[in-house]
Amino acid sequence: MSTEEMVTPESVGGEPFVTVQQHILQEQKRFPGASGEFSWLLSGITLATKLIQAKVRRAGLTDILGDQGDVNVQGEVQQKLDVYSNDMLDHCLSMRESIGVLASEENEHPEIINHTSPNAKYAVVFDPLDGSSNIDVNVSVGTTFSILHRPFGEGTDDAASWVLQPGSKQVAAGYVVYGSSTILVYSAGYGVHGFTLDPAVGAFLLSHENIRMPDQGKYYSVNEAYRDSFPPQYVKYLDHVRSGGLGRGYSSRYIGSMVADFHRTLLKGGIFLYPPTEEQPDGKLRLLYEANPIAFIAEHAGGKATNGHERVLDIVPKSIHQRTPLVVGSQVEMDSFEVFSNG
Ligand code: AHM
Ligand code: MG
């Protein structure tokens, strides 16, 4: 029995509550014949992210800030937090028989788990600790994940073919933000739901049911230091937003952790952009484990996501670590962006 199933109303102050585990089990009833494998798979993600958040919370107290390969005072090799996070996801997910392939930002190649087992139905792709350069300065970081069904037909013996699927094929996706609180946001295609970790009981409790992105926000989010090397349509669009072209004044917010910048955009509306630059013509963010889960969540919450030319979820990936420009946000901002990017 997981920690979440053991939570009682008394342990959370007598208030009614739903744990992420209960919620996933309810969601699963939508799929006739569902065997519980999917909720078991997701519980691997929630367990790993609880372990990661515990380590992130102690970041200033332990020796874990050193570079990988440093030796601490006890003579032990120090682990960087992103390596630790990768290990935790790997450990918690590789025990799930329903998973055939795992792929991570931290590993060059996809890892084959139960590839040949007929019970292996899913691939999980993740960025274990997005924005990890922010750790040293106490700024929010996060984990992103994307779950894909085993591909059908020829070529399925090739692990890469399990993960090289367009984002529209995601069965579920989500992220965790390790911020002022720890929040898990996920969608299995039926709404977007947020669960805040109650540190007292160690359970993710439903705090944001059926999140809808506002039609318009008041923040735009982009690294404006690169403005001179953005393609001209991005510069024109940003000038339009700043000059009141969308009918209201905007402020800018840029944390430099995509998950945190997107989470604000999801709840408050607005737009987040990581455009192509002269140095990085394909942008910086990775398609499979950064842009795809964010685009999936955005669309299921009523927003949109594009690479400047096409819907992010329609891009057919060619390689596991491929990059993509990402523009994601509310309807009003995105519709206007599309006018500029087509013009
Ligand atoms: P990472 O995966 O190495 O952490 O890099 C991704 C991060 C994103 O979280 C964030 O949106 C972006 O890098 C910020 O980059 P920049 O400093 O160029 O604005
Ligand atoms: Mg990342």
Image: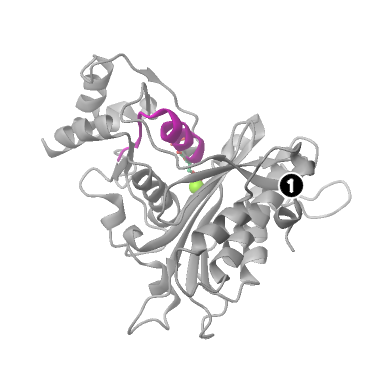
User: Which residue occupies the extreme right position in the image?
Assistant: 74
Q: Quadrant of residue 266?
A: top left
| Residue at (20, 18) in percent of width and height | 245
**Number of marks in picture:** 1
Neighbours of disc 1 within 10 Å: few (<14), some (14-19), many (20+): few
Q: Is residue 275 magenta?
A: yes
Residue 113, can we see it? yes
x then y, percent, for residue 221: 39, 28
User: Which residue occupies the extreme left position in the image?
Assistant: 343
| Residue at (78, 40) in percent of width and height | 200
x then y, percent, for residue 250: 34, 17
| Residue at (74, 44) in percent of width and height | 9
Quickly name the residue at label 1.
Answer: 202
Residue 80, can we see it? no
| Residue at (50, 58) in percent of width and height | 27
Q: Amino acid at mark 1?
A: Gly
x then y, percent, for residue 238: 26, 24
Mark 1, secondary structure of its residue = loop
x then y, percent, for residue 93: 61, 66
Relative to 121, 83 lies left or right: right
Relative to 148, 116 lies left or right: right
Q: Is residue 108 above or below residue 232?
A: below
Q: Is residue 171 above or below residue 72?
A: below
Q: Is residue 60 above or below residue 75?
A: above
Q: Quadrant of the C terminus?
A: top left
Q: Quadrant of the N terminus?
A: bottom right
- In this rendered view, identify the residue nearer to me: 37 or 28: 28
Q: Which residues are magenta?
A: 259-276
Q: Is residue 192 magenta?
A: no
Q: Quadrant of residue 2?
A: bottom right
